[in-house]
Image (spheres, helix red, strand yellow):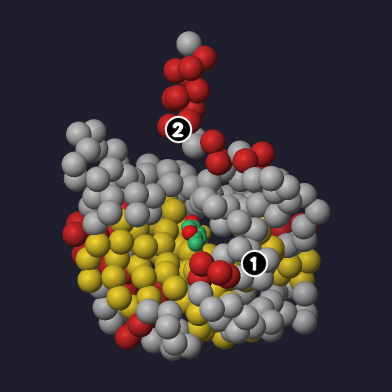
Amino acid sequence: LAGCSYKLRHQLHPVWQSPLSVPGGRRQSPINITLRDSLHDPHLKPLKIRYDSNTCTQIWNNGYSFLVEFDDSTDKSTLSGGPLLNQYRLCQFHFHWGESNAVGSEHTIDGILFPAELHLVHWNASKYKSFEEAVMEGDGLAVVAVFLKIGKRHEGLQKLVDALPAVRHKDSVVEFTSFNPSCLLPTCLDYWTYSGSLTTPPLTESVAWIIKKKPVEVSHDQLAVFRSLLFTSADEEEQKSMVNNFRLQQPLMNRTVRSSFS
Ligand SMILES: Cc1cc(=S)c(O)co1
Ligand SMILES: [Zn+2]
């Protein structure tokens, strides 16, 4: 019986969900951000985000989320400023979402969950030669997270939503160009920042997290298209809908979350 319950638990929450799965995991993500424990740091600079829509190349269903990928061979789409000492290149963005609007985000604000969370992934091109090299370094990555809430339709997102049926199955890829992800950022400049990790394997502790304070609105129907994607490839008999692709929250340990606003 234990075996099957393990199998069920493993399917529901893969083993890497727990904090014990990463040796010495002292800066794991995601976390709950408590407003009362976050510290306003007046020395934090404004974020400098410069994206070029010509670097957008394709969308790939990797069997866990869908990644919108960018040509990161030049400094055309970059992130700097904020808590960062170097310039980081955008390489992909993806989302985490739930089976319903009640769950979905990885980070929470005073325990408040959002139906989805956008992650814009950048790597430190000032110090490292590639994402693969940077992902192993403590200052290798910077991920900008934006919460999604249900409200009015997001016109900029619709181009992406319309392309998703083409990547319904795991390992499918479709060309996707001329998209500027700046349209997915809230106008408010406020953010929190803390040192953490990837939220999927290899869970490396290489991420400077930058969490935007304000969510962006998307419509219920737009988010429903995310849930029409599948974890499974076209040749698998059992089709599993791609939902709840978020990691459980991890212990803060001795970290401080800083805010760019008071
Ligand atoms: C590189 C990378 C970053 C995050 S946050 C993720 O979910 C998957 O891969
Ligand atoms: Zn992510």
Residue named by callout 1: 137
Precedes in sequence: disc 2 or disc 1 = 2
Is residue 158 visible in the rendered structure shown here?
A: no
Q: Nearer the viewer, residue 59 or 249?
A: 59
Residue at 37%, 63% in the rendered image:
67
Q: Nearer the viewer, residue 203 or 33?
A: 203
On the image, the x and y values in percent for residue 247 come to 53, 46
On the image, the x and y values in percent for residue 173 come to 24, 62
- Give the total of numbered labels: 2
Q: Nearer the viewer, residue 101 or 131?
A: 131
Drawn side of residue 49 relative to residue 237, left or right: right
Check disc 1 and report its element: helix, strand or loop.
loop
Residue at 62%, 80% in the rendered image:
127
Q: Are the residues flagged by discs 2 and 1 in contact, CB closer than 8 Å? A: no
On the image, the x and y values in percent for residue 44 come to 72, 80
Q: Quadrant of residue 221?
A: bottom left
Q: Quadrant of residue 37?
A: bottom right
Q: Residues within 10 Å of mark 2 (few under 14, many from 20)?
A: few
Residue at 29%, 38% in the rendered image:
240
Q: Nearer the viewer, mark 2 or mark 1?
A: 1
| Vertical arrangement, residue 37 with respect to residue 15, above or below | below
Q: Quadrant of the C terminus?
A: bottom right
Mark linked to residue 74: none
Residue named by callout 2: 12
| Vertical arrangement, residue 231 with respect to residue 65, above or below | above
Looking at the picture, which amino acid does disc 1 mark? Glu
Q: Nearer the viewer, residue 188 or 256?
A: 256
Residue at 20%, 34% in the rendered image:
237
Looking at the picture, which amino acid does disc 2 mark? Leu
Is residue 244 visible in the rendered structure shown here?
A: yes
Drawn side of residue 21 relative to residue 251, left or right: left
